[in-house]
Image: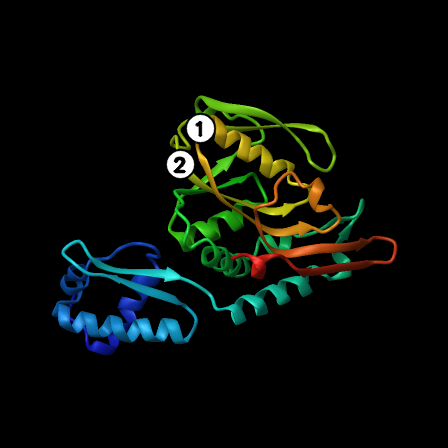
Amino acid sequence: MKKLKRSARLVEMTRFLLSRPHHLIPLTTFAQRYGAAKSSISEDLAIIKEVFENEGMGELHTLAGAAGGVKYIPKVSREHALAFINQLCERLSQPDRILPGGYLYMSDLLGQPALMNEAGKLFATIFSNREIDCIMTVETKGIPLAYATGAELNLPVVLVRRDHQVTEGSAVSINYVSGSHKSLHTMTLSRRALKEKSRVLIMDDFMKAGGTIQGMVDLLAEFDAKVAGVGVLVESGEIESEQRLLQDYVSLATLTVVDAKGKEIKVEPGNYFSIE
């Protein structure tokens, strides 16, 4: 890459860091890339670090030594997270989202990359200090959220299927019981998709009693894998805590009222801010 002026180098370095979250980048990489001395690179990184922290964009962690470098950790401020969650609750509370049977229509929001990217940043922030090897979700609506979170944590996504596909090779299948309807379902995961003893972050778009997520937890046990955390975009507030199949999870929003007859929906912030 040709030698850049400092202003252009700062822009390019920022782009480079933003596209590689949670990835340790040696200072020599920047020095060789921009034809600059390490001392100049260090000064540039100090400027970028200050801007990131002041603007609530995340943190730059510097590791000293021969094997050291710099790592960008995406994080959002509490103020930014609160504003996003309130906006999400407001959009989910629109009366025309009520579907027959008292269901909530969310597909349009799940299909908006900008919205899912922001949600992914919130989950990447809350789970940034946990050791995680990959993200897991079950097809299909949880996929956008899982990929958005995976992009911010720089982690691969593992997709659990409802039905086994021949193109997946040999797979592990389990039956699980829906926590809300008490009906029996099947989920399957290719043996090649997940390494044994992996630390997995489970993501889902909606949780009622937690049967689907508990199914993924049971599936992970077949791989001797560990649950590193559970993130949910929206949880149902109709289920009592003792009826939930799991208690350790992070939610952005809670659906408290769905009145199909009165055309009323109430959505409140989830437990995101109560998690340590």
Q: Going 43% across and 26% down the picture, which residue do you hit? A: 191
- CB under 8 Å between discs 1 and 2: yes
Q: Give the colour scheme of this rendering.
A: rainbow
Q: Which mark is residue 28?
A: none
Q: Which residue shows up at 57% across the image and 61% down it?
A: 273
> As shown in the figure, which amino acid type bears the numbered disc 1?
Phe
Q: What residue is disc 1 on?
A: 223
Up the image or down, 180 lies above or below 72; here it is above
**Where is residue 17 drawn, in percent x and y?**
31, 62
Pinpoint residue 144: horizontal percent, then vertical percent. 52, 49
Q: Nearer the viewer, residue 90 or 49?
A: 49
Query: In which image quadrant can residue 18 be found?
Result: bottom left
- Direction top: furthest residue: 170
Decide if residue 107 is on the left or right side of residue 121: right
**Vertical comparison of 186 with 126: above or below:** above
Which amino acid lies under the numbered mark 2 shown in the image of this protein?
Answer: Ser
Q: Label 2 neighbourhood size at 10 Å, few (<14), some (14-19), many (20+)? A: some
Tell me residue 10's x, y (percent): 26, 73
Q: Considering only vertical position in the picture, is 51 above or below 275?
A: below
Find residue 198 and name its label: 2
